[in-house]
Structures are given as C-alpha cells and as structure tokens.
Image (cartoon, helix red, strand yellow):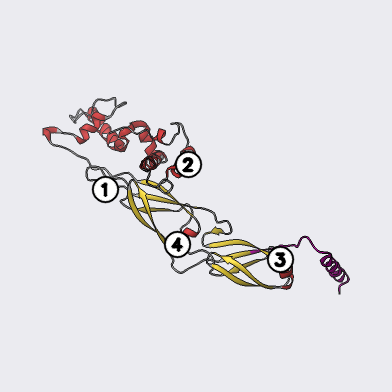
C-alpha cells in the first residue's frame, strides 16, 4: 500500500493543533470542492484526499495510530492485540506464532503479511476489517433549509442523493450508513457523517425555530399608527401598527418563523423589533409645525 502523507495533503505540520487542522481542512475543502471545480478531475481527486486526511487527523485516536503506524494505521488494534498475545506467550513459555520479533518500530509489513498471508499448513487466513468512516461538510444558506430538498453529493467518486429535511440546524451532523470506505476482506463498510454549515441571513437571525428581525418605522406611523408591510421568509405580510409605538417595541408573528426539524407543517414564530427612525432634512414648514407641537405639549394642551 502506498503511503499517503495526510499532513502534506492538508499543508500543515505534524505538530499542528486540532484548530489548525480544522482551519486547513475548511480552507482547502472550499478551494477544491467539486461544485466550484466542475469537470476538473484533479480537483475532484484532491478533494477526496483532503476529506480522507481530515477524517483521520481530526480524530485524536486515529491520528495517534496514523502517527505510530503510518500506512498500516487501520490495523493498529490487531497489531497491538497480536503483540500482547506474543508477550503473554513468551511469559508463559507457550509456542504461539511470532510476528516478526519484539521490536515493531519501523515498517510493519511482516506483521501484516502474517495477518493476511499464508498461515500454518499453507492455509490463508484473512481478518475482516470495517471500512473507514468519512466526514464531509455541506455549506448551505438559510433559505436552502427552509424547505425540504434533495441534493446530489459526490463523495469518494460516488454520487449520493441526499434528502435534506427542512429545519436542519447549523453544525448538525447526520449519518448515512454504509457510505464510508469499503470494508477489507468482506468487512462492513464505514459510515458517512455530514456536518451542515448554514450561513447567516442578512435580514433574519435564527435561534432554533424562532426568527428575529428589526424593522424600521417612520416617526409618523409610530405616533399615529397605521399599516406596515414587512418581509418574512415566506413573503410579505401586513401589520397594524398601534398608535404611539415606541422604538424597540417587539411584536410576535405566530407561525412565521422557521420550520421545526422533522415536524412537517410546524413552524416557530417571527419576532419583530421596531426601530423608530427620526426624519432628517426638515423643511422650514415642518420645523414650524414641530415647534408648535412642542409648545402644545409643554403647555399641556
């Protein structure tokens, strides 16, 4: 098996921290993502290598095994078990098979050949190994997860049709069973874990199934009341503004928030904060009227 330097693929050092690994992965995944490099086989291959490297180095246990065993890291548990059995055999004076001597530093090929090659009597012994789990990030907008939709992802050269339920949260992880790397010697496939990264919306802030927004309100509507059209993610709605509405007043629009995850037809609420805007560039007539109004208020009339 050809050795793949995962540190080199992610363009980081062996001493890099978990934060360094995460930052490097996100930067390179964006750069080589198939959606941004259509029909580019080199970018596609690079993207697959980046995902594989991140899957190993972002997991402390897998990284530890990779650092110690190199290309044979997937079989580290079997090696450790065999090494332990050998040590026990020596202690008890037993006659179990030797796996290449007591010092296993360096190349582990002899051990793995004994695991998969011919055993005693020329019989072939093969051990089944589960395939690797894969991790991928899917970048979406808030509107992308406002309604249930389907997307086709390319993972390790395979197209996977994925149904994305409305209401998926930022940072949420879903598992797609059996879509990791293939198992070895008939072992089960690994799983695919997809992390959703959902961009902020320029107008609406999301917290679970609730949405929050700020709406400007002119001084005259705030004082006298009236009708106001406001945006929601599902279109415009008309609101009745109560006379003498103060700045920072909050109103709730029931059912106009975000879909509740995996509860079809259920929505959270939309919370609107009014921001009363004072008029600027007043005309002389307006100044005169406001001055008169100010005197009336001062006199209590």
Vertical position of residue 194 compared to residue 252: above or below: above
Q: CA distance from mark 3 to mark 1?
A: 64 Å
Q: Which residue is mark 3?
A: 218
Vertical position of residue 238 compared to residue 206: above or below: below
Q: Nearer the viewer, mark 2 or mark 4?
A: 2
Which quadrant is home to the C terminus?
Answer: bottom right
Which residues make up the magenta segment? 273-301
Q: Which residue is mark 4?
A: 166
Tag 2: Cα neighbours inside 10 Å, few (<14), some, or many (≥20)?
Answer: few
Q: Pick whichever of labels 2 and 1 is earlier in the sequence.
A: 2
Q: Pick whichever of labels 3 and 1 is earlier in the sequence.
A: 1
Q: Nearer the viewer, mark 2 or mark 1?
A: 2
Most foreground residue, 173 or 165: 165
Q: CA distance from mark 3 to mark 4?
A: 35 Å
- Quadrant of residue 251 in the image? bottom right
- Left or right for 85, reference 4: left
Q: Which residue is mark 1?
A: 188
SS at circle 1: loop
SS at circle 3: strand
Question: Residue placed at 81% from the left, 67% from the top?
Answer: 286
- Left or right for 287, reference 227: right
SS at circle 2: helix
Whether residues under marks 3 and 2 lie with C-beta atoms below 8 angstroms apart, the answer is: no
Q: Nearer the viewer, mark 3 or mark 4?
A: 3
Whether residues under marks 2 and 1 lie with C-beta atoms below 8 angstroms apart, the answer is: no
């Amino acid at each position: 098996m050809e050795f793949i330097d995962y540190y080199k693929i992610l363009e980081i050092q062996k001493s890099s921290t978990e934060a360094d690994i995460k930052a490097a992965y996100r930067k390179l995944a964006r750069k080589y993502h198939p959606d941004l490099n259509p029909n580019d086989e080199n970018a596609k291959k690079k993207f697959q290598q980046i995902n594989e490297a991140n899957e190993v180095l972002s997991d402390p246990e897998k990284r530890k095994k990779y650092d110690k065993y190199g290309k044979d890291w997937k079989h580290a548990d079997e090696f450790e078990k065999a090494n332990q059995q050998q040590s026990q055999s020596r202690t008890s004076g037993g006659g179990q098979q030797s796996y290449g001597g007591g010092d296993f530093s360096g190349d582990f090929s002899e051990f793995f050949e004994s695991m998969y090659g011919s055993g005693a009597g020329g019989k072939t012994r093969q051990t089944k190994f589960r395939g690797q789990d894969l991790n991928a990030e899917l970048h979406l907008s808030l509107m992308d997860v406002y309604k249930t939709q389907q997307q086709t992802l390319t993972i390790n050269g395979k197209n996977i049709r994925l149904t994305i339920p409305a209401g998926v949260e930022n940072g949420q992880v879903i598992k797609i069973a059996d879509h990791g790397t293939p198992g070895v010697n008939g072992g089960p496939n690994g799983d695919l874990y997809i992390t959703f990264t959902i961009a902020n919306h320029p107008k609406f802030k999301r917290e679970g199934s609730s949405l929050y927004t700020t709406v400007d309100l002119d001084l005259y509507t705030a004082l006298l009341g009236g009708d106001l059209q406001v945006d929601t993610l599902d279109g415009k709605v008309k609101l009745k503004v109560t006379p003498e509405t103060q700045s920072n007043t909050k109103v709730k629009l029931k059912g106009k928030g975000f879909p509740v995850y995996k509860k079809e037809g259920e929505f959270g609420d939309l919370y609107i904060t009014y921001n009363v805007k004072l008029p600027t560039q007043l005309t002389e007539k307006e100044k005169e009227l406001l001055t008169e109004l100010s005197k009336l208020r001062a006199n209590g009339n």
